[in-house]
Image: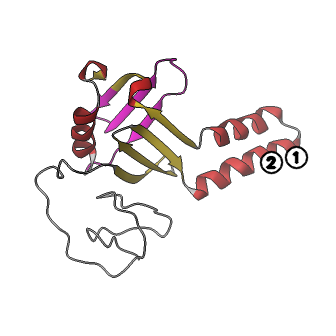
Amino acid sequence: MPFCTSCGQELTAADRFCTSCGAPAGPLTAPVMPVTQASPPPASQDEIRWTNKVLGFTSDYFVNPEGAGQAASKKTSDVNTGLAVAGTLLGSLSTAGAGILAKSREDDFIRWDESRSVALNRKKKTVTVTRKSLIFPIRLYCTDKNYDQVVAFIRKNVDPALIKE
């Protein structure tokens, strides 16, 4: 099993980012001694990235000073493509449409200045970023380990009037 070269967290071969610290998975090596970090990351950090699995599908998430985004994993993208193709071949317009819609939403980004609100849900460890147009919000599924780090980053980079608890 591969391990994160930054913090030693065990990863799956499909992970593009560490599920614990958000470091790029890059070349995977044997485990290293994890670094215990009781305080938030240094203020100079420009971006937080992480991978999380929700309902069996893996996605990559990130926040940076410009906004928030998410990208589907290769496996999720393949499932969406398969759904669109299968629906087309079987003559099921609703199945094909669902696959095409899912493909169109695989990668998304919302700039903070284009946001209507940023809702923080500590219980579910989620951050929901809603566009001013109210269509296609992004939900970032944080891990237990990185939720507080992501919230601190958002509080530093987002207009406080947009943040909803």
Mark 1–mark 2 CB contact (< 8 Å): yes
In the structure shown, which secondary structural element does the residue marked by tag 1 occupy? helix
Could you tell me which residue is drawn at 14 percent across and 63 percent down? 36
According to the image, label 2 marks what residue? 85
Query: Farthest left residue?
Result: 38
Camera sees residue 122: no
**Dot 1 crowding, Cα within 10 Å, few <14, some 14–19, many 20+:** few
Q: In which quarter of the image is the N terminus?
A: bottom left
**Residue 22 makes an appearance in the image:** yes
**Amino acid on which disc 1 is placed:** Leu
Magenta residues (range): 119-144
- What colour-coding does the image apply? secondary structure
Query: Three-letter amino acid code at disc 2?
Result: Val
Residue 147, image x, y percentages? 27, 43
Is residue 106 shown left or right of residue 128? right
Q: Residue at x 27, y 34 (%)?
A: 157
